[in-house]
Image (cartoon, rainbow, N blue to C red):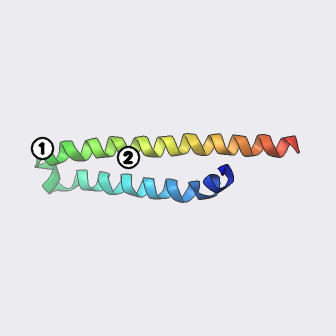
């Protein structure tokens, strides 16, 4: 199970980072900067997207550590 998760982790991180980049670009759009409600909503989405990216990196590190530990046992 963890092997499959590890194999898909890079793609999952890339997808999450693209989402974060897209939201950040939207937040810098002049139309959105002028709209306080939209900007507030975007920043909430950016915070949530950043949390997803951070959690994926933590999980990736956990899986890499597990993989290394298993390789060292054999």
Instruction: Name the residue nearer the viewer: 45 or 30.
Output: 45
Q: What element carries label 1?
A: helix
Q: In this view, does 3 lie above or below 51?
A: below
The percent position of residue 53, horizontal first and vertical second, equals 46, 46
Q: Mark 1 points at which residue?
A: 36
Quarter of the image with the C terminus is top right
Q: Find residue 46 and report its image quarter.
A: top left
User: Badges 1 and 2: C-beta atoms under 8 Å apart?
Assistant: no
Disc 1 crowd, CA 10 A, few/some/many (<14, 14-19, 20+): few
Q: In this view, does 64 lie to the left or right of 24?
A: right
**Residue 41 vs residue 45: left or right?**
left
Q: Label 2 neighbourhood size at 10 Å, few (<14), some (14-19), many (20+)?
A: many
Say what secondary structure mark 2 lies in.
helix
Q: Mark 2 points at which residue?
A: 49
Q: Residue furthest front?
A: 1
- State the separation of the CA atoms marked 1 and 2: 20 Å
What percent of the width, then of the height, locates residue 27?
24, 50
Look at 44% across and 53% down and name the residue there. Answer: 16
Along the viewing direction, whichever of 51 and 1 lies nearer the viewer: 1
Spot occupied by residue 4 in the image (x, y as percentages of width and height): 64, 56
Image check: 67 left or right of 63? right
Which of these two is toward me, 30 or 69? 69
Residue occupying the point 63% across, 52% down: 6
């Amino acid at each position: 199970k963890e092997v499959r998760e590890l194999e898909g982790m890079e793609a999952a991180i890339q997808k999450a980072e693209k989402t974060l980049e897209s939201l950040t670009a939207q937040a810098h759009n002049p139309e959105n900067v002028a709209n306080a409600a939209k900007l507030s909503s975007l920043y909430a989405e950016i915070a949530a997207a950043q949390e997803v990216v951070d959690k994926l990196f933590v999980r990736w590190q956990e899986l890499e550590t597990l993989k290394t530990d298993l390789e060292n046992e054999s």
